Image: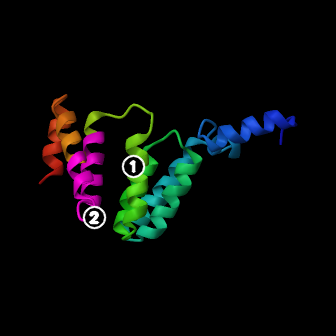
C-alpha cells in the first residue's frame, strides 16, 4: 500500500466508504473483470439462484458504487429470493442515488418499489405510483415505461 500519513489514510478510507473511490480501482480490476462478475450474476439469476445472484450483485455494488445498475439488479434478485425488506432497501438506494438516471428507468424503479411495499405500506406505494405518473408526463419514453409497468 502507498505510504500515507494518518490523515491521508482516513480521507482515503472515508472516500472508499462514501463511494467516491470505487473498490474496483483499489483492487486494480478492469472492465473485463467487472463484466465477468456481472455475467456470473446474470447466469445465477437466470438459473433461479436468486440469493447467489443477490450476493454477487452486492459485491459488484461494493466494487462499483458509481454504477447504480448493480443495486437495481440486486434489488430484483433479492425480491425474487423472497428478501423483500432487503429489496426495499436496495431499490430505495437506487432511487435515491445522485447519478443521472433516465426518466423511464426511474419510473420502472418507482413502480417496482410500489409493488414491493403495496401490502404492508399502501400509502408509500400510492406515493410512488403518483411520483411515477408525474414523471411519466415529462417524456414519451417515461410514459411508455409506465404503461409497460402497470400491465
For label 1, the crowd category at 10 Å Cα-Cα, with few meaning under 14, some 14 to 19 and many 20 or more, is some
What is the chief secondary structure element of the magenta stretch?
A: helix
Give the mark toward the camera: 2 or 1: 2
Residue 148 lies, with reference to residue 87, above or below; the image says above
Residue 120 got which mark? 2
Q: Residue at x 18, y 35 (%)?
A: 134
Q: Quadrant of residue 8?
A: top right
Q: Residues within 10 Å of mark 2 (few under 14, many from 20)?
A: few
Q: Which residue is mark 1?
A: 92
State which quadrant residue 42 falls in: bottom left
Q: Secondary structure at mark 1?
A: helix
The N terminus, quarter of image: top right
**Residue 83 picture location, percent across and down:** 40, 68
Q: Is residue 92 left or right of residue 142?
A: right
Q: Is residue 7 left or right of residue 81?
A: right
Q: Which stretch did the figure color magenta? A: 105-127
In the image as oriented, which residue stretches furthest toward the top? Answer: 138
- Position of residue 7 measured from the top left corner of the image (x, y, whole percent): 81, 34
Looking at the picture, tell me which residue is in the foreground, 100 or 29.
100
Query: Which percent across, then down, holds residue 99?
Result: 44, 33
Question: Secondary structure beneath disc 2?
Answer: loop
Amino acid at each position: 500500500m502507498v505510504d500515507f500519513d494518518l490523515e491521508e489514510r482516513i480521507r482515503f478510507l472515508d472516500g472508499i466508504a462514501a463511494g467516491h473511490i470505487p473498490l474496483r480501482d483499489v483492487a486494480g480490476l478492469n472492465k473485463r473483470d467487472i463484466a465477468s462478475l456481472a455475467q456470473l450474476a446474470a447466469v445465477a439469476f437466470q438459473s433461479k439462484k436468486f440469493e447467489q445472484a443477490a450476493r454477487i450483485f452486492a459485491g459488484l455494488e461494493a466494487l462499483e458504487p458509481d454504477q447504480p445498475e448493480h443495486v437495481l439488479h440486486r434489488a430484483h434478485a433479492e425480491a425474487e429470493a423472497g428478501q423483500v425488506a432487503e429489496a426495499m432497501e436496495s431499490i430505495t438506494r437506487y432511487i435515491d442515488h445522485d447519478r443521472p438516471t433516465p426518466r423511464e428507468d426511474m419510473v420502472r424503479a418507482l413502480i417496482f418499489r410500489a409493488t414491493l411495499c403495496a401490502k404492508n405500506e399502501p400509502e408509500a406505494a400510492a406515493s410512488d405510483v403518483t411520483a411515477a405518473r408525474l414523471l411519466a408526463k415529462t417524456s414519451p419514453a417515461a410514459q411508455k415505461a409506465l404503461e409497460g409497468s402497470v400491465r
